[in-house]
Each structure stands twice: as C-alpha cells, then as structure tokens.
Image: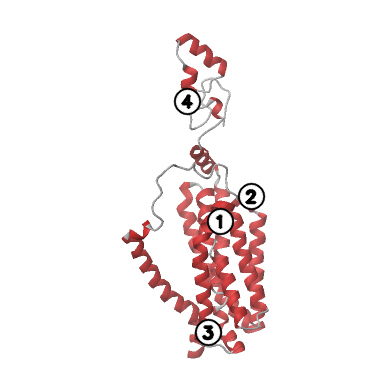
Amino acid sequence: MPTSTSGATCCAGCRFPNRSRRAERTLAGRNGQRRRGFLAAQNPVHCRHPSKSTAMTATSAALPPSRDLEVVSLIGCAHGVSHFFHLLLPPLFPWLMKDFALSFTGIGATMTVFFVVSAMGQALAGFLVDRYGAARVLGGGIGCCLTASLLLAVADGYAALAIVAALAGLGNSVFHPADFTVLNRRVSPPRLSYAFSIHGLSGNLGWALAPVFMTGIAATAGWRVAALAAAALAALALALLFWRRRTLADPPHSLPAPEVATPAPLLAFLRSPAVWLCFAFFFLITTAFGAIQNFATPILQNLA
C-alpha cells in the first residue's frame, strides 16, 4: 500500500524510497544527474503501475486463512457434486433396465456417452474458463447437471437416457479446468497443497454419497423421485455458488502479461514419452475402475 512517510517504500515490491516529484527534481538539480528518469524507469512514482506479477502475489499473500478456507470449501462442494453426478445413472441401472427393457450393453452405452462428451468438453472448457471466468463456467456445469437430473425424472425411453448422460457429461467436463483455476488464483501459495488435497477428498466423498443416496431413495420412493432429489442437491450447490460468487471471482491482474514466443506445433506434446505413459496408465486404471463403478450395483443384485 502506498504511504506518504519520508524515506519509506511505497510497496513491498519497491526498492526505492517514496519521494515526491518536487523532491526528485531538487535531488536531480543538486547532483546534476537524471535521477528522476532513473527512478521512474525502475519503479513509477507512488507505484501507480506495479507489475501484474507483483499485484497477483500481493493479492494471494494478503488473503487470510478464513478466505482460503471459504474458497476451498466452495470448490470442494462443487467438485463433490461433479463426482456425485458421475453416478447419477449407474445406481439406478436395475430399475432402468426393468422399466425400459434394456440389456447391460444398452444401459452401459449411456455411460460411454457420458464420458465421451465429458472428454471432449474438457478439451474446450479451459478456453471458456480463460474467456468468461472460472466462476461462470463452474455455474454452467452445475446447471447442466441440474438439467440432466430433471430430465431423468421425466424420461420415457432410451433416447431420453442418452440425452441425460450427454448433459451430465457436459456438466462434468468443466469442473477440473474451473476448479484448478480458482484454487490457483484465489488460494495463498503456502496453502495450495492442502487445497488440492481437500479438492480430491471432496470428489471421493461425492462418489461415496451417490450410491447410498440414489439407491436408498429409489428403493423407497422410486427412481424418478431419486432423480428429483439429485436435482435438489445440484440446485442447492448452484445457489451456494451464486450467493458466494464474489469469493470465486477472478482477482485483478490474475493473468500474467502475454509473452512473445515462437508458437510450437499444435501436436508437439505427442512427441513426449511421458505423455503416452500417463495416457496408458490413466486409460487402464479408468477402464477397470469404470467397470466396477458402473456395474457393481446390478452385479451384486444378481449375486444376491
């Protein structure tokens, strides 16, 4: 923050005293040097135009722990909702297969739709976050999940289930690009590791809640009521994010100044062995995990 104390620096990023213009002219006249120009080149008077990196660092460092906790809690809630909606349909497979006369292949294809749309959407979500802001994109994702659950409650055939899966996948696609952007911009650097840990934990809690929540309500009140209950959860999360939207808004100077560089070829990253190793690892683990996650409920029902 600027100060008017003689000899004091005008901000934490300045190396030079905060002098008035008259004092600078006097000093330049006495020494016969272009002191004013030298000082202005190093740091403008009164630090009127600090660098963006300095502003961003000061903003992050100035955040109190309570503000960091609020940001992490809001993002954790959103991430939990996204993982909950991974399992919007799978716990209801026994009821959906019976009511719509579907095979395992047919009902499983809805999850293929979910993850294909989600994968394609994630490739574009980062651009939307940069253009419109993470908070808006995050709200749009939860809105898609809300719409998907409402449509599920009135679904009357397989085509409707496919649309539900596509909408839920589209909503799911925005969470990681938006979540990580907010955490990096709004959480103080010393607390980022804790923020990412809570972010991962909240997602797993969403996974853990969905089967119990959906099957419990479906068994007692029907699967359409379970879909409406899921919509209520999404609406609650959306209302919470809207209420605290200023907390998640991008801070000023959060984006660094663009650097002039020679653009790399579009697919240059495919030459990296590390990229392919990571792709193979996540492909295999996701295939195994997805089979267990999506078909555990009907398999256990048949075993019983």
Quarter assignment of residue 158: bottom right
In the rendered structure, which disc, 4 or 2, sits on the residue that comes first in sequence?
Answer: 4
Q: Position of residue 198 (x, y in %)?
A: 50, 59
Q: Disc 2 marks which residue?
A: 246
Residue 182 screen position, x and y as percent: 54, 53
- In the picture, residue 138 is in which quadrant? bottom right
Image quarter for residue 149? bottom right
Per the image, the residue denoted by label 3 is: 106
- CA–CA distance in space, label 4 to label 2: 36 Å
Q: Which residue is mark 4?
A: 41
Relative to residue 36, is residue 140 drawn left or right? Answer: right
The first of marks 3 and 2 along the sequence is 3
> Which mark sits nearer the N-terminus, 1 or 3?
3
Residue position for label 1: 128
Mark 1 or mark 4, which is nearer the start of the sequence?
Answer: 4
Foreground of the two, 208 or 15: 15
